Amino acid sequence: MLNIRYEYTTEKKVKPDYSKLGFGKYFTDHMFMMDYTEGQGWHDARIVPFQNLSLSPATAVFHYAQEMFEGLKAYKTADGKIQLFRPQKNIERLNNTNRRMCIPEIDPDDVLQAIKAVVKTDEDWIPEEEGKSLYIRPFIIATDAMLGVHPSHSYLFCIILSPVGAYYATGINPVKIYVEPEYVRAVKGGTGFAKVGGNYAASLKGQEVAEKLGYAQVLWLDGIHHKYIDEVGAMNVFFVIDGEIITPTLENGNILPGVTRDSAIQLLRSWGYKVSERLLSIDEIREAADNGKLDEAFGTGTAAVISPIGELNEAGKVMIINEGKIGPISQRLYNNLTGIQWGTVEDTMGWTVAVD
Ligand code: COI
């Protein structure tokens, strides 16, 4: 159990207009911080006013990107209760990432306590309208000031909070996705399964090209054959082909094991749908589109929730999915998942965790 020290802000911020939140632009009054030093372990847990960090220009994270992050959300229900959605899954992934990145693990109970404590401290920032939530961004950076390529001996763990609306400007309306023809995001043996900034840095070039062509995000193909579907920039991806719901398998280790991905699979199976976690090639998708069997496609993610895909562009070949409209499976998933999160649908899976 952490002994958290509190230092409250003396100057509370003016809250933004909650009807124009967007994603990740505003930050609350406080943040959580905790240090790691070799020999001492994780120590000095504290909740302090939201502040800039002061670090040596030689700090390891700036040069060799030894860092990690997570993303989850807090919701306020109609009766004023605060709840988290499957935080244990994020915390488990946090430590999986830490192991891959040579960052010392953190006791899962301590991470949950820290998340709850900082959310509780800034609970007045949690949006009350359905569709909006408080995004929780835990992250860890290597803080040794040294230029040798070596795991750091010291780290900083922070949790910052941001009231958010929809990730995409289009909201729940279908997004247009560009199939990346050249760059790759991850390969087997790399860090694709881990939540690290480097994966996202590597994705920016493809994203930039896609955006210029009017597409919201990139669909990544695997790094070896450049043929199998991996994931979309900020979300996992599902395709419905001739009644079968298919999402890429996690087995190769190049895809992020999304919490929303796992929740979608469990919900769909509980409703009797066949969900396959397997290799899915872009050829199979193209063929299905040509034969009128590509029924639906959608992305899943904490930030993106359930995001229908209305159009795919593969090397100039445009595939319109479900006439560019949200399909029945995507809609049902969205309604149920967000219903559980905002407390309007019964949580029969036991996924929500109260913040008291
Ligand atoms: C999330 O869905 O929480 C993510 O981390 C995706 C993205 C905003 C990087």
Image: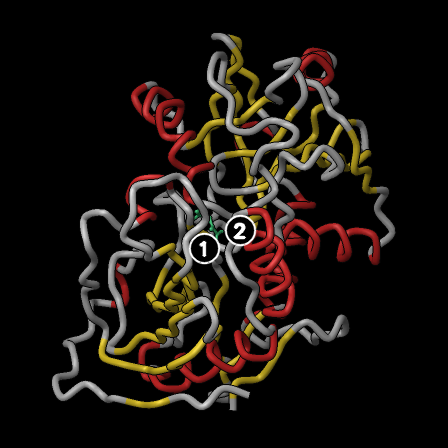
Residue at 81% from the left image edge and 34% from the top image edge? 244
> Do we see residue 175 in this rendering?
yes
Q: Nearer the viewer, mark 2 or mark 1?
A: 2
Disc 1 C-beta below 8 A from ligand 1: yes
Residue occupied by mark 2:
102
> Do we see residue 132 in this rendering?
no
Residue at 19% from the left image edge and 54% from the top image edge? 56
Residue occupied by mark 1:
69
Viewer-closest of 170 and 97: 97
Q: Is residue 246 left or right of residue 68?
A: right
Viewer-closest of 303 and 69: 69
Residue 295 in percent (x, y) is at: 70, 30
Q: Is residue 327 above or below residue 121?
A: above
Return the mark for residue 214.
none
What is the quadrant of residue 8 in the picture?
A: bottom left
Residue 105 in percent (x, y) is at: 57, 64
What is the quadrant of residue 65 in the picture?
A: top left
Q: Secondary structure at mark 2?
A: loop
Q: Amino acid at mark 1?
A: Phe
Binning the other alpha carbons within 10 Å of mark 1 as few (below 14), some (14 to 19) or many (20 upward) gives many
Quadrant of the rendering where the N terminus is positioned: bottom right
Q: How many marks?
A: 2
Residue at 37% from the left image edge and 67% from the top image edge? 158
Residue at 41% from the left image edge and 68% from the top image edge? 37
Q: Amino acid at mark 2?
A: Cys
Disc 2 C-beta below 8 A from ligand 1: no
Viewer-closest of 340 and 247: 247
Mark 2 near mark 1, Cβ–Cβ under 8 Å? no
Q: Is residue 238 left or right of residue 3?
A: right
Q: Earlier in the sequence, mark 2 or mark 1?
A: 1
Q: Residue furthest top?
A: 316
Q: Is residue 125 above or below residue 219?
A: below
